[in-house]
Every structure is written in C-alpha cells, then in structure tokens.
Amino acid sequence: MKFIFFRHGETDSNVKNIMQGAGMDTPLNANGIQQAKELAEKAKNLGLEKIYSSTLTRAIQTGTLVAAACGLDVEPIGGIEEFHYGDVEGMYVPDAIKQFGIDKVLFNETDPELYDQHLPGGETINQCIARVVSVLQKIKKENEGKCDCIGIISHGAVMCILYYYFFKIHHPIANCEWFETEM
C-alpha cells in the first residue's frame, strides 16, 4: 500500500522560529493557505483514495484543501500529530537551544544513541516512532483491499523522523513538501 506523507502549510510560528509541537494548535497563515492550495492542485494527480490528517488545526486545514481537490474528505486521526516537545513548546528556538542545548532541541534522527533523549515533559524519538508507526499500521489494516494510495497530512519533525525511518537519509521537510513510501 502506498502512503504519501504531506507536511502542513506555513504558520506564524514557523515564520517566527518558535518551537511548535503537538502542544501548540496554531492555524495556517495566509501564505500557508496559499501553499496548501498549490499542494492541493498537485495532489489531484497522485491517485489518493483516502486522506487522514493529524488532529491539529494546521494539518486539518491543509488536509481539507487537499481532500477537496481530490474529491475526498479528510479524516482527522490521533497519533500522527507533531513531535511532543514538552516544556520548550512556544519558546523561540535560540532561547530553547540556550536553555537546553542544541542536541536536545534540534534532535538528530540519524543518531540512534539519541533516540531515548527527551526534553522535560517531551517524548523521545523512539516514542514518536512507536506512536506514529502504530497508527500507520492501523490505517493500513483498516484499508487493506479497499484502497491502494493513502494520504497522511502531518508535521515537519514527525515527517523528518519518518523519512529517516523509511529511507535512512536525513531530509528536513519544508511546508507542503511530500514524500511517498510503500508499507
């Protein structure tokens, strides 16, 4: 089954370099809405048969535009939301780095020795992988024999972690960028 992962459009927190994880439910800004509309036009030709999104507003907004362009509905589902950053949610990235260290704030998904580190109140990379992959396996099981191509609207850190999980390549994910894989 093909899964196509899409990152949501831009938010003001993205522009302001604010740590925006699962604990911040921010909407798309005007540029993010335009990015999502452009993504929706491109997604029309990808053969999507079902679309799920994170339960966070920015992903639902992006997913709604993509789904509408494909003649589908978006189904928000828990477990594919952004990385849980804990106590650094809402902090400016430079302040978070100064307080907690760059290796903790800007984690390195290519170094498995760091997979069990976390910020205060946050999750580890291993916890994130387990959470998201569990939901993807559930989605796959529910849709086997019903559809061959599923869209997942998610978030930058989660998608960066997944990209490394699937391909063993570090690749930062821009707003409204996507990648696909078979599961």
Image (spheres, grey):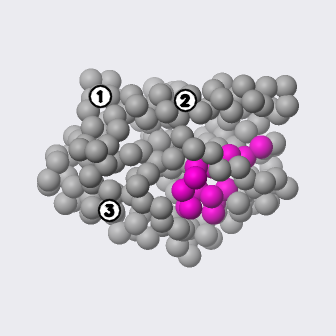
Q: Is residue 127 visible?
A: yes
Q: Is residue 54 left or right of residue 22?
A: right
For mark 2, does the 10 Å Cα neighbourhood hold few (<14), some (14 to 19), or many (20 or more) residues? some
Mark 2 secondary-structure assignment: helix
Q: Residue 169: where, in percent of width, then height?
A: 45, 31
Q: Which mark is residue 133?
A: 2
The amino acid beneath tag 1 is: Asp
The residue tagged 1 is 116
Judging by the rendered image, the residue that carries numbered circle 3 is: 90
Residue drawn where x is 46% and y is 48% of the image:
82
Q: CA distance from mark 3 to mark 1?
A: 22 Å
Residue 134, magenta (yes or no): no
Q: Which of the numbered marks, if any, corresponds to residue 156? A: none
Residue 127 location (% of width, % of height):
40, 31
| Above or below: residue 8 compared with residue 51 | below
Sequence-first tag of 3 and 1: 3
Asked which quadrant contains residue 145, the reply is: top right
What x and y, as percent, mark residue 106? 29, 45
- 34 w.r.t. 9: above or below: below
Q: Residue at x 47, y 61 (%)?
A: 25
Q: Residue at x 32, y 43 (%)?
A: 122
Please state the extent of the stretch shown in magenta in the rendering.
50-63
